[in-house]
Image (cartoon, rainbow, N blue to C red):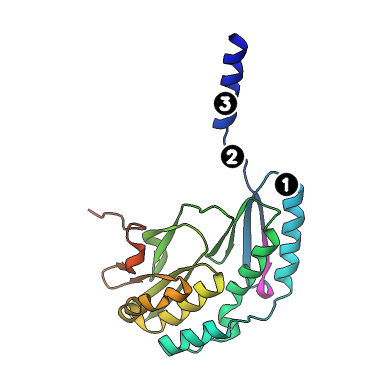
Amino acid sequence: MKTVLLLALAAACADAAPPKPPVSRVWPVLGGGTMMSAAVWGPDTLTIGRALDAVRDTTDHPGHVSVDSLRRDVRQATGVALTAGDLEEGDALDRAAPVLVGAADSALLDIGGHFLWVGPRPTRRPVGIAHPASSLDHLATVDMQGGSVSTASRARGDTALSVTVLAPSAAAAEAWATGLLGVGCDSALALAPRLALWRASVVCADSGGGRVRWSRDLEGRVVVPHKP
């Protein structure tokens, strides 16, 4: 009986053991103008290390962004013409993701605050929605469950706004964030239902009163802190 109890306690302790820390790397990308970071979880750190070396080689040699239909849809919807350079961060993230599949259980990739989750299971990570006039001041958080989160922002005179897009691919998130920024919050949210093909969701923040608004499909996933 004592042996069975000890085995049961050992099993319970094993189940309660904290997850292993991720293997983390940071390196310059896109000509050294920004940094890419990776936090990767998995049972074999040596395999993960080799995969991250391969990811770095991939991002050292930029590929061609073959997203003609995406760029066409953004231009038709917003009137904003995107170049390949507008999608280079998303391109780098999307090319890195397949290299990690099979080598890791999951991974979080980041280039300049543009995130991509890699893995078969969803994550639950709050991503800050920064005040468009001050990146150090968060107005809200959005629940990232998978895919990519990208933010584009601009300041003109006394006004500033940002558009954050959640989408399955990093290129789609970056493209729609850039395009919707060009039309402003009202139009961006009005266009949000038309993004169903790309499974993209929208959060928009502007400096006028620090307002945060989001597309209907994000109800329950955006948290705006109460300010007394």
Q: Distance of mark 2 from mark 1, alpha carbons?
A: 14 Å
Q: Is residue 30 magenta?
A: yes
Taking the image as shown, residue 122 lies to the left or right of residue 60, namely: left
Q: Amino acid at mark 2?
A: Pro
Question: Does residue 150 lie above or below 84 as drawn?
Answer: above
The residue stretch that appears in magenta: 26-31
Q: Nearer the viewer, residue 118 or 111?
A: 118
Query: Could you say where residue 79 lies in the image, as x and y percent from the top left?
Result: 43, 90
Q: Is residue 7 magenta?
A: no
Residue that numbered label 3 is attached to: 13
Q: Residues within 10 Å of mark 3 (few under 14, many from 20)?
A: few
Query: Could you say where residue 179 lies in the image, as x and y percent from the top left?
Result: 45, 82
For the N terminus, give its image quadrant. Answer: top right
Secondary element under disc 3, as helix, strand or loop, is: helix
Q: Nearer the viewer, residue 19 or 11?
A: 11
Query: Could you say where residue 218 lies in the image, as x and y percent from the top left?
Result: 36, 63
| Residue visible at 56% across and 31% down in the picture | 15
The reply to whether dot 3 and dot 2 touch (C-beta < 8 Å) is no
Q: Is residue 117 visible?
A: yes
Label number found at residue 45? 1
